[in-house]
Image: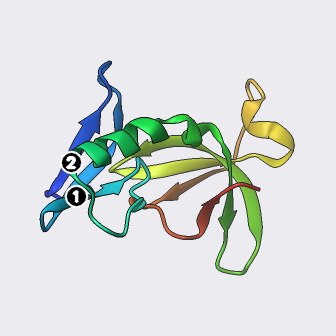
């Protein structure tokens, strides 16, 4: 669930890029998965620039999901919203196969540390 004090930042075409959260005289930045991108607050324009540079391309990357028993699975993000994030299993590029019956995993928003970029 999206915290009430998060300020949405959109591209000129209306696509959401992430959020900014007021912190003192500056803003902390969060991506579309709810992950904090900054530790120290930035000026408003710096925060906007960071989200613009990040874009949304990282959502198409391969990710790794670690389960409580330590097993890891390669996954791709199927859906990302403040209501939650859905990832699909991607062994051997299965997530790209048309008509594939993929195993899905629903994660909370912000995503937990068990989901990390790369494989």
Residue 65, how many percent across, how many down? Answer: 66, 62
Label 2 neighbour load within 10 Å: few <14, some 14-19, many 20+: some
Most distant residue in the bottom direction: 69
> Can you identify the residue that label 1 sits on?
27
Sequence-first tag of 2 and 1 = 1
Q: Which residue is found at the position 22% from the left and 58% from the top?
A: 27
Residue 105 horizontal/vertical position (percent): 58, 55
Describe residue 101's horizontal placement relative to residue 17 as left or right.
Answer: right
Up-down relation of residue 114 to residue 9 (above or below): below
Residue at 62%, 61% in the rendered image: 116
CA distance for labels 2 and 1:
6 Å
User: Residue at label 2?
Assistant: 44
Q: Residue 119, position in %: x, y?
A: 77, 56
| Callout 2 touching callout 1 (CB < 8 Å) | yes
Which residue is at 76% across, 46% downward? 90
- Numbered badge on residue 3: none
Position of 66 relative to 3 (above/below):
below
Q: Is residue 63 left or right of residue 77?
A: right
Mark 2, secondary structure of its residue: helix
State the residue at coordinates (33%, 50%): 82
Question: Quarter of the image holding residue 100?
Answer: top right
The front one of 97 and 2 is 2
Q: Position of residue 18 (x, y in %)?
A: 34, 44
Q: Secondary structure at mark 1?
A: strand
Q: Which colour style is shown? A: rainbow
Q: In this image, 111 relative to 9: left or right?
A: right
Pick whichever, 87 or 20, lies toward us.
20
The residue lying furthest to the right in this view is 92
Quadrant of residue 37 within the rendered picture: bottom left
**Picture quarter containing residue 94?**
top right
């Amino acid at each position: 669930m999206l915290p009430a004090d998060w300020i949405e930042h959109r591209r000129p075409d209306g696509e959401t890029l992430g959020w900014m959260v007021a912190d003192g005289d500056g803003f902390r930045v969060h991506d579309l998965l709810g992950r904090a991108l900054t530790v120290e607050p930035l000026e408003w324009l710096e925060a906007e620039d960071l989200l613009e540079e990040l874009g949304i391309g990282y959502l198409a990357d391969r990710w790794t999901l670690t389960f409580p028993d330590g097993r890891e699975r390669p996954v791709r993000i199927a859906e990302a919203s403040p209501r939650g994030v859905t990832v699909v299993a991607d062994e051997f590029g299965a997530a790209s196969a048309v008509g594939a019956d993929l195993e899905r995993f629903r994660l909370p928003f912000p995503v937990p540390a068990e989901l990390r970029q790369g494989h």
